[in-house]
Structures are given as structure tokens and as C-alpha cells.
Image (cartoon, helix red, strand yellow):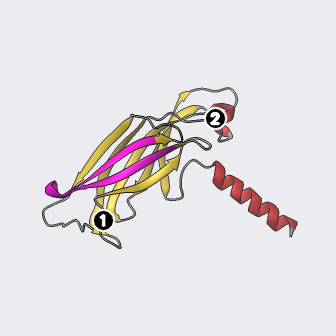
Amino acid sequence: MQTNALALLLAASTCLTLNTPVFAEQVGEVSTVFKFIGANHKIVVDAYDDPKVKGVTCYVSRAKTGGISGTLGLAEDKAEASIACRQVGPISFEGKPLKAQEDVFSERISLVFKTLNVVRMVDAKRNTLVYLTYSDRVIEGSPENSVTAVALGPDITIPLK
């Protein structure tokens, strides 16, 4: 009984300290600052498959704070991020029609206060999916942002709500 409770507590604490959601896949990382104690500061690149648009993957690069506080998941990562979304396979739409603007992914980049967000917007006139990344905070957000677009061919119709 105590072993199961300990295992559950360990699993829960691990989930709380991870900075990437389950559906993110780390593609790579580069160290930017060496730290004697704890992990180095680095830039990480994660891949996110759009859950409603099969065949589109977004690559987000961002700074990840190292050192003791970063290793323990207590550091606040910088708000800057870059995004590039690409068609990686045949396009198909999963489930319900898309909203004109919708939150697609979010990832915690500090213990409590800051979140990195990716929003999908539909440019119906140009038959294009536009993806915007930005960070927000409990008190105030950041004007730092990045945008990318995936133009769809004339043979693909975006199902809109």
C-alpha cells in the first residue's frame, strides 16, 4: 500500500516538474551556457503535431534555463520563442470543423506563472493555416511572438465552424 502511494506521488511530482506536454517530442537541443552545477542553459526544439490537422507539425524553439533552479523545474524560462509549421504528410482534418481561431498547444515555462501558447488561425480567403506563438503570465504577457503559415492547395477545403 505504501509502495503504491509512493509510486503515485513520484509520478505526480514528475508530471508537475516536466516542462513539455505529453504530445511534444523533443527534436534536439544546443547548450548555450555551461553551468558547473545543474543542467546547462540551452535552446530546445520541440515538435508538436496539430491535433486537429493531420499532416501539419509545428517546430518551436525556445530557451530553457539550466543551473540548479532549472534542473529542479523552479526557473522561469525566457518568453522568446520561434515557430515554424510545415506540411509533413497528407492533410486531413480530425473531428469537428475548425474554429476561426483556436488554442492548439500550451506549455508551462515557469513553475506557476508563465505559459507558452500556440494559436491556430484560419485565413479562409487564402486557404492558409496561420500559427502564432506567444507567452502569457498571470500578471502580464509578453509582446514577444512569432508567426508561421501553412498554405494549403486548392484541392483542400478547410472545414470552418
Q: Residue at x 84, y 65 (%)?
A: 3
Q: Residue at x 39, y 34 (%)?
A: 144
Question: Most extreme residue toward the bottom, as rendered?
Answer: 95
Q: Secondary structure at mark 1?
A: loop
Q: Residue at x 61, y 33 (%)?
A: 66
Q: Is 48 placed left or right of 34 in the picture?
A: left
The relative height of residue 129 versus residue 139 in the rendered view (above or below) is below
Mark count: 2
The percent coordinates of residue 44 (x first, y second) are: 49, 40
From which residue to which does the magenta span run?
115-135
Q: Amino acid at mark 2?
A: Ala
The label shown at residue 39 is: 2
Q: Is 116 placed left or right of 5 in the picture?
A: left
Q: Nearer the viewer, mark 2 or mark 1?
A: 1
Which is more N-terminal, label 1 or label 2?
2
Q: Which residue is mark 1?
A: 98
In terms of depth relative to the viewer, which is nearer, 90 or 13? 13
Q: Quadrant of the rendered structure where residue 61 is?
A: top left
The percent coordinates of residue 82 (x first, y second) are: 38, 39
Check the picture and name the quadrant holding the C terminus: bottom left
The relative height of residue 66 versus residue 103 in the rendered view (above or below) is above
Q: Residue at x 68, y 53 (%)?
A: 14
Q: Quadrant of the rendered structure where residue 71 is?
A: top right
Q: Is residue 128 magenta?
A: yes
